[in-house]
């Protein structure tokens, strides 16, 4: 079941959902709109290696915007810091963003119960498009879970994305054993 606007507000009141900054105008019928933060990043190397730490270059989106190009993976970040302690958060693109040919995540749209951070976006485009910091970029929806939880994300000793940040975070796949 997806939470409605009234249920999202009730969970925020309980403290099981946190959104900072919060703007009531961004609350939809069953979602909350999030915005593109001020930073983007690109990988230094054109060929990425899943077994090594691939370095990124972080830069600020200028006031006049930034043109995203095809065939480049951009890492972005949401303005909003979120915490979800009793639900499964999903981040999806807004239809207006999709109609510009912008994908905001490659495969990482689902968060875990206990996720507490900004959201790193894996941005790609079908044609060049100018973007701006602060533009609506996606929407969070929240699913209920059934049963008790033993392994909250923010309490896992091996969770790789727990350090609070306002910048995009590169893949930490290299920390996995394989």
Image: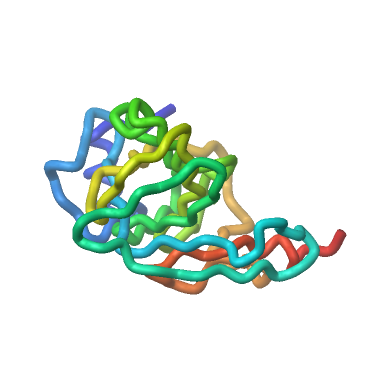
Asked whether, in this view, residue 6 is left or right of residue 114, the answer is left
Is residue 63 left or right of 110 when viewed as pictured?
A: left
Residue at point 45%, 42% (across, down) = 104
- Residue 60 image point, x, y percent: 33, 67
* Residue 40 x, y percent position in the rendering: 41, 61
Image quadrant of residue 175?
bottom right
* Number of marks in the rendered image: 0
**Front in this rendered view, residue 73 or 35:** 73
Q: Residue 78, relative to residue 110: is it above or below?
A: below
Q: Residue at x 71, y 56 (%)?
A: 47
Q: Is residue 16 left or right of residue 146?
A: left
| Residue depicted at x 26% and y 43% | 136
Q: Would you say 74 lies left or right of 50 here?
A: left
Q: Residue furthest right?
A: 178
Front-lying residue, 51 or 70: 70
Q: Name the spot of residue 74 as percent of width and height, x first.
A: 49, 53
Residue 87 lies, in percent from the top left, at: 45, 44
Residue in the image at 42% along x and 71% along y? 165
Q: Is residue 102 visible?
A: yes
* Up/down of 150 relative to 52, above or below: above
């Amino acid at each position: 079941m997806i939470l409605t606007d009234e249920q999202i507000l009730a969970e925020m009141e309980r403290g099981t959902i946190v959104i900072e900054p919060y703007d009531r105008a961004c609350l939809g019928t069953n979602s909350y709109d999030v915005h593109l933060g001020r930073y983007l990043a690109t990988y230094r190397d054109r060929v990425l290696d899943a077994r090594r730490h691939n370095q990124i270059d972080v830069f600020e989106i200028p006031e006049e915007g930034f043109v995203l190009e095809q065939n480049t993976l951009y890492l972005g970040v949401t303005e909003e810091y979120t915490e979800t302690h009793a639900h499964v958060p999903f981040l999806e693109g807004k239809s207006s963003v999709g109609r510009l040919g912008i994908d905001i995540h490659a495969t990482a749209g689902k968060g875990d119960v206990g996720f507490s951070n900004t959201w790193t976006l894996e941005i790609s485009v079908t044609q060049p498009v100018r973007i701006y910091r602060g533009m609506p970029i996606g929407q969070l929806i929240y699913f209920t879970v059934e049963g008790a939880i033993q392994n909250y994300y923010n309490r896992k000793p091996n969770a790789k994305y727990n350090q609070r940040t306002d910048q995009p975070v590169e893949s930490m796949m290299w920390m996995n054993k394989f």
